[in-house]
Image (cartoon, rainbow, N blue to C red):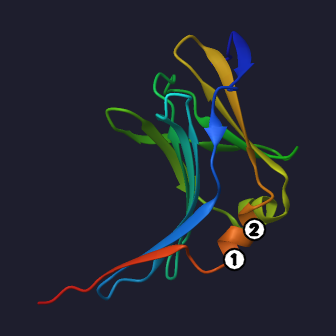
């Protein structure tokens, strides 16, 4: 479906990139490097996660704003590179999540890129674009996590 128009999401303010990890019992460690954008009301608008595991392929997932046209996938583009298309995989009451496996090329582009653009299509069939700075991503992703959540399971 071709959008009828476009606009930039200017009312979304992005915080800092953060990295947290999770380790549960005998499972492998899973880390998430994320950035969250919020509306002026404080409500989450967008969250982008790069999920990595010690023993499995990584995943990119986008928590999308409410009111998107779900048949169109989310387009993720870094600088002027070809976009990646992320299908919507599930929805909650207040957000839908689009996601897919990461590729080594996507991670390399994120490590060296300057800007990441997310393009959504809303229910009015307008293309919405959010621009996220990538310059801090590489440093945050390579450093130890800000927090590690561990849970030991006693049997």
Q: Which residue is mark 2?
A: 138
Residue at the spot x=52%, y=15% of the render?
123
- Along the line of sight, the residue nearer the viewer: 42 or 144: 42
Q: Residue 88 in the image: x percent, y percent? A: 48, 39
- Along the line of sight, the residue nearer the viewer: 32 or 103: 32
Q: Residue 113 in the image: x percent, y percent? A: 84, 56
Q: Are marks 2 and 1 in contact (CB under 8 Å)?
A: yes
Residue at the spot x=68%, y=69% of the render?
140
Is 141 positioned to the left or the right of 97 in the image? right
- Along the line of sight, the residue nearer the viewer: 72 or 65: 65
Work out which quarter of the rendered image holds the N terminus and state it. Answer: top right
Instruction: State whether residue 72 is above or below residue 30.
Output: above
Other residues around mark 1 within 10 Å, as few (<14) / some (14–19) / many (≥20): few
Instruction: State whether residue 129 is above or below residue 124.
Output: below
Q: Which residue is mark 1?
A: 142
Residue at the spot x=64%, y=58% of the render?
17
């Amino acid at each position: 479906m071709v959008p009828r128009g476009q606009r930039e999401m200017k009312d979304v303010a992005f915080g800092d990139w953060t990295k947290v990890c999770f380790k549960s019992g005998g499972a492998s460690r899973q880390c998430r490097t994320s950035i969250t954008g919020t509306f002026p009301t404080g409500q989450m608008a967008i969250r982008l996660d790069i999920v990595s595991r010690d023993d499995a392929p990584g995943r990119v997932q986008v928590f999308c704003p409410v009111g998107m046209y779900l048949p169109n996938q989310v387009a993720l583009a870094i600088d002027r590179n070809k976009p990646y298309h992320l299908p919507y995989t599930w929805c909650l009451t207040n957000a839908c999540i689009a996601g897919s496996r990461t590729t080594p090329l996507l991670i390399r582009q994120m490590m060296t890129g300057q800007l990441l653009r997310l393009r959504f299509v809303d229910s009015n069939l307008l293309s919405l674009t959010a621009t996220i700075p990538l310059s801090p991503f590489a440093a945050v992703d390579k450093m130890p996590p800000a927090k590690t959540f561990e849970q030991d399971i006693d049997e």
